[in-house]
Image: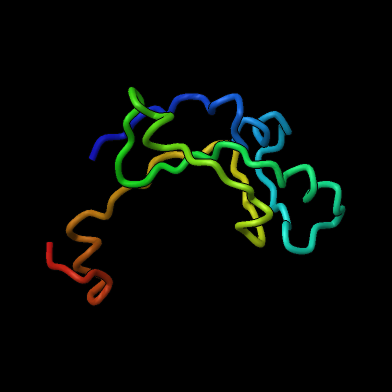
């Protein structure tokens, strides 16, 4: 496992837009928004970053961004401005939780 620093968000992305809200985190209802104008302003397709088990900062735009319209794709959106890497379980922790994994370590 390698913990990597993620680059700042692309200027045309939802992530960049939400970062500028200056809130640590929030829940954004999209199916039944508190104000319909919020949903309407978010309908325009923007870049959305997706990082899974791999991350390639050298080719980030091509490999990790896609165009999305959040209100057309999701009922709710949860925003966390900062996160950190998940810490893997040790072998001892895995042994204490039998049946948790589909494979043996």
- At x 43%, y 29%, the residue is 61
Work out whether 70 lies above or below 57: below
Query: Where residue 44 sits: x, y (%)?
Result: 69, 42
For the N terminus, the image quarter is top left
Along the horizontal axis of the image, is 84 left or right of 79?
A: left
Work out whether 99 lies above or below 104: below
- At x 33%, y 22%, the residue is 58
For the C terminus, the image quarter is bottom left
Work out whether 21 lies above or below 53: above
Query: Where residue 25 sits: x, y (%)?
Result: 66, 44
Which of the pair 77/13 is nearer the observer? 13
Which of the pair 67/26 is nearer the observer? 67
Along the horizontal axis of the image, is 83 left or right of 24?
A: left
- At x 80%, y 58%, the residue is 33
Along the horizontal axis of the image, is 92 left or right of 82?
A: left
Query: Where residue 102 sits: x, y (%)?
Result: 21, 71
Query: Where residue 16 sits: x, y (%)?
Result: 62, 30
């Amino acid at each position: 496992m390698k913990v990597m620093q993620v680059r700042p968000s692309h200027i045309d992305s939802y992530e960049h837009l939400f970062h500028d809200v200056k809130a640590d985190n929030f829940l954004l209802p999209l199916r039944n928004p508190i104000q319909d104008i919020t949903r309407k302003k978010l309908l325009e397709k923007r870049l959305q970053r997706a990082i899974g088990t791999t991350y390639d900062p050298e080719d980030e735009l091509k490999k990790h961004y896609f165009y999305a319209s959040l209100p057309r794709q999701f009922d709710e959106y949860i925003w966390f401005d900062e996160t950190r890497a998940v810490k893997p379980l040790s072998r001892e922790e895995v042994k204490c939780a039998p049946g948790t994994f589909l494979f043996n370590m």
